[in-house]
Image: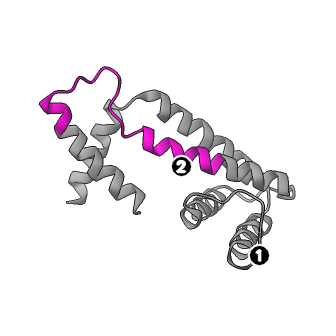
Amino acid sequence: MWQWVGRFTTHLASEMDKRPHNELIRLTTELRELVSSSSTESIAGSCAAEVYTRLGVENDSPKLSSEFRQLFFVLGLMLSSPEPENPKPFTKANWERAKQLLEEIFSLYAFMFWPTDDEAPTNEMCAKSQCRRFSITSIMRF
């Protein structure tokens, strides 16, 4: 089954609108650059502080749409980037920018599953639409 899902998502990627995909790559690259310049300790501390403030303290900072998924995404970027030799502190401004990027990335995923402008409403499109609904549901629940 998972081989089918992999082939299907590759097929979708080849037919989707490239603008959201390119923007997703740009935003993720910017987030990776932001994270890779700071120490593991400061990024993990920022993620922990985000969870802590959401659990028990009032906070005026905007909330993430899918908080734990987005925090694990940041931690994944951090872990897949080498530790900098001279790390910069991960400041509150860095954290707010990271959250803004995470929200932009999260919102772009929805657009990647809409039909492109040149897809006409045909039986083939209806079949693709059913598959896209399955695919987006799988990704959003991951």
Label 2: few (<14), some (14–19) or many (≥20) C-alpha neighbours in 10 Å = some
Part of the protein shown in magenta = 101-126
Residue at the spot 77% in from the left edge and 56% down from the top edge = 95
Given the image, on which type of amino acid does mark 1 rest? Val
Q: Quadrant of residue 74?
A: bottom right
Residue at the spot 21% in from the left edge and 45% down from the top edge = 130
* Residue pointed to by mark 1: 57
Answer with left or right where residue 83 lies relative to residue 138. right
3D distance between C-alphas at marks 1 and 2: 25 Å
| Secondary element at image label 1 | loop
| Secondary element at image label 2 | helix
Q: Quadrant of residue 13?
A: top left
Counting from the top left corner in percent of width and height, residue 66 is at 55, 61
Residues 28 and 97: in front is 97
Counting from the top left corner in percent of width and height, residue 33 is at 71, 45
Residues 59 and 94: in front is 59
Residues 62 and 38: in front is 62
Residue at the spot 36% in from the left edge and 32% down from the top edge = 16
Q: Earlier in the sequence, mark 1 or mark 2?
A: 1
* Residue pointed to by mark 2: 106
Q: Is residue 105 magenta?
A: yes
Counting from the top left corner in percent of width and height, residue 83 is at 74, 59
Residue found at the far left of this picture: 123
Above or below residue 14? Residue 52 is: below
Answer with left or right where residue 88 lies relative to residue 59. right
